[in-house]
Amino acid sequence: MRLSRFFLPTLKETPAEAKIVSHRLMLRAGMIRQESAGIYSWLPLGLRVLKNIETIIRDEQDAAGAQEILMPTIQSADLWRESGRYDDYGKEMLRIEDRHGRDLLYGPTNEEMVTSILRDCIKSYKQLPVNLYHIQWKFRDEVRPRFGIMRCREFLMKDAYSFDLDLEGAKRSYDNMFAAYLRTFARMGLKAVPVRADPGAIGGDMSHEFHILAETGESAIFYDAAYDEMTLDMDNPDVAALQSIYAAEEELHDPEKCPVADDRLKQARGIEVGHIFFFGTKYSAAMGLVVDGPGGERITPEMGSYGIGVSRLPAAIIEASHDENGIIWPDSVAPFAVGLVNLKVSDEACVSQCDDIYDRLRDAGIEALYDDRDERPGAKFADMDLIGLPWQLVVGPRGVAAGTVELKRRAGGEKEELSLDSALEKLTG
Ligand code: P5A
């Protein structure tokens, strides 16, 4: 993509309303735009990151055996009357009336809907276990939307729902998602801390939140130093060992009853990027989801649900990975792999060299953002640092004469003068 054609409305000034660094950088880098309180448009640079994050999540959900579906954003109030949550959910639910006077709502979550799908579509124990997920927009009329897309009203969630025949199977499904979450966040360059949490409006008696440590995190978490000392094999994380380590979100942490000695107890701020729940038959029983067992007995499936804050993740990643000049994207989610910078667009040799590199990168399957604008080098470097692409490949008249290019790694800032072939090799390797 040529930067001269790319819709990238960067801001020079730091927007006054943005209180935390991820919000400031996302606005300055032209990733998002606020439409109304807690409601955002995603501009091309931001959407590319969001899509990459979605892809990693989808990949790990599929690998864990969950199957993708797509449920609507608008739901019927009657479904929620069946579970009893229509009245319980309160003001966070956006309620809508259609032209026929029927009560609808913009879904804040989908436990009821997915339970009704299973109720209508399965009859036998042979059709279980099953885990269905979707990646869909949600609406929660938060009292205080803040920090940009971190806590907003309209947000993208990955939500999965598991159905099992017995408690043992349900715990296996829970642990399976637990492990998938650790892998998912690790692939985004994030170390997530799983902590016991309060299930709140979703219900049930066991839940874990996954937190990214950051000063600006909205939650306080407490955990045993053993977690930091543990080496985790992300391909096959030891879920039982992890769950046995004390770790709790503020509301569940009771200093009186905490089994960890003071000098071993860590306190930190965290951004909640995922939350998983085990709630047994709360929805299946209330909504009459039953299957026939092997001996003709009626079985009410045990359920769990598993959420990831997809649209919160770009902000969480930025909180964890930035410097004073801007964002530092991990390779796996970066909007482009490399920024190709032409320092002098009035120089024919530079232009033809850059055009050639641009074609070769494309042929090698590497996505580049090609800064072909007629701007000062300082402005080009500042923009590249701001938008945080993992590599910068810089072409100027001196290098062209010497047969070299400069390759800079955004994280760490190391620069190397290399022949074009070695630079390309480094990028493709
Ligand atoms: C789990 C999946 C649920 O809704 N039902 C389906 C369960 N869980 S949750 O904890 O309430 O939300 C899951 C994740 O969504 C993100 N999230 C938000 N992101 C941005 N703005 C919000 N207002 C918001 N609310 C929740 C969080 O990452 C949360 O862990």
Image (spheres, grey):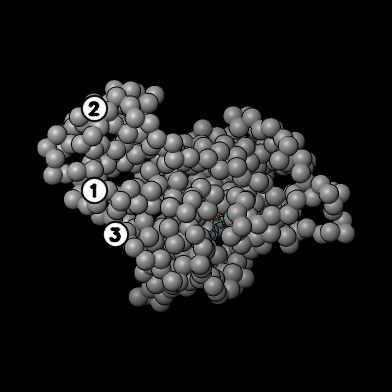
Q: Which mark is residue 3?
A: 1
Q: Which mark is residue 132?
A: none
Q: Could you give the CA–CA distance between mark 3 and mark 1, rounded to whole angstroms?
A: 11 Å
**394 left or right of 328?**
left
Q: Amino acid at mark 1?
A: Leu
Q: Could you give the CA–CA distance between mark 2 and mark 1, rounded to whole angstroms?
A: 26 Å
**Disc with the residue nearer the chain's start (2 vs 1):** 1
Which residue does the numbered mark 3 point to in the structure image? 9
Q: Quadrant of the C terminus?
A: top left
**292 left or right of 34?**
right
- Name the residue rendered at 35%, 34% in the picture: 407
Q: Decide: marks 3, 1 in contact (CB < 8 A)? A: no
Image coordinates for residue 164, horizontal then vertical, percent: 64, 41
Q: Secondary structure at mark 1?
A: loop
**Disc with the residue nearer the chain's start (3 vs 2):** 3
Q: Could you give the CA–CA distance between mark 3 and mark 2, rounded to whole angstroms?
A: 35 Å
Q: Quadrant of the N terminus?
A: top left
Image coordinates for residue 385, horizontal then vertical, percent: 38, 48
- Name the residue rendered at 60%, 50% in the picture: 212
**Disc with the residue nearer the chain's start (3 vs 1):** 1
Image coordinates for residue 313, horizontal then vertical, percent: 50, 51
Q: Amino acid at mark 2?
A: Ala
Q: Taking 414 as reference, is 323 above or below it?
A: below
Q: Taking 395 as reference, is 49 above or below it?
A: below
Q: Which mark is residue 402?
A: 2
Whether residue 120 can be seen here: no
Q: Quadrant of ligand 1?
A: bottom right
Which quadrant holds residue 242? top right
